[in-house]
Structure formats: structure tokens, C-alpha cells
Amino acid sequence: MASVVVSARVDEGTRRKAEAAARRAGMSLGSLISGFVSDLATTGKVPDSYTTDRELLRRRRALDTLEEISRSFPVGTPLDTMTRDEFMEEAYGDRD
């Protein structure tokens, strides 16, 4: 497969710090960037640490909505604490 060059602008100080961190991990900055791009292409997902505040807010709202919906569900007795007779009563009620 043919390779392409992808470029990005970063602050010089940021680049130096990133290269030093990559070296300490025994890798080059280029190999880390290539790995990130490959993972993104494979999974189709951006790691949570890269999401924007807007995306994080959207996720929090979705979780809040889910919690609100779950609170509206009726609360019953946990099945693992019920006897067979209690389960039958809960599941089928009085069938006379």
C-alpha cells in the first residue's frame, strides 16, 4: 500500500516535549502519530482524551437522559433474593 505524508502544525516547544516523551518510550514521534492514525482508521473512534468539550457535553447529556429514564422504571424485588413462590407471584400475580 502506498504511503502518504500527513502534516500538522504544532508549537515548537510542544513538538520537542512530545519527541522527548516518545524517545523515553523507545519510539519516534512519527511512529506514535502513525499508530494513532492507524488505530483511528481501524476502530473509527477517537479516544476520550481527544474529544472536544462539545462532544463531552453531548455525552453527559445523553447519560443524564438515560439516568432520568431509568429512574422512571418501576422498582421490583431483585430476582436473586426471591423464593420460587415469590417469583411466581411477582411474575404472574394472582391467577384465580
Image (tube, rainbow, N blue to C red):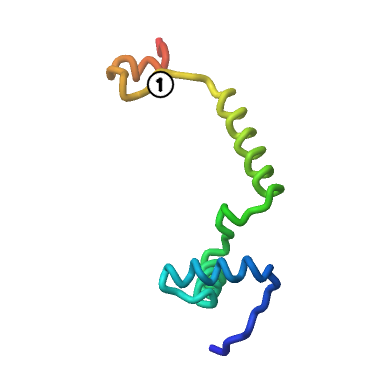
Q: Position of residue 72 (x, y in %)?
A: 59, 23
**Viewer-side residue, 90 vs 24:** 24
Q: Position of residue 21 (x, y in %)?
A: 49, 66
Q: What's the residue at 51%, 69% (across, down)?
A: 20
The amino acid sitting under disc 1 is Ala
**Viewer-side residue, 88 vs 63:** 63
**Viewer-side residue, 22 vs 94:** 22
Q: Count of labels shown?
A: 1
Q: Residues within 10 Å of mark 1 (few under 14, many from 20)?
A: few
Q: Position of residue 84 (x, y in %)?
A: 28, 19
Q: Is residue 52 above or below residue 76?
A: below
The image quadrant of residue 4 is bottom right
Q: What's the residue at 62%, 66% (across, down)?
A: 14
Q: What's the residue at 55%, 24% (across, down)?
A: 73
Q: Is residue 82 left or right of residue 6?
A: left
Q: Is residue 18 above or below residue 89?
A: below
Q: Is residue 58 above or below residue 31?
A: above
Please identify the residue farthest to the bottom as the structure is shown.
Answer: 2
Q: What's the residue at 57%, 24% (across, down)?
A: 71
Q: Residue under circle 1?
A: 91
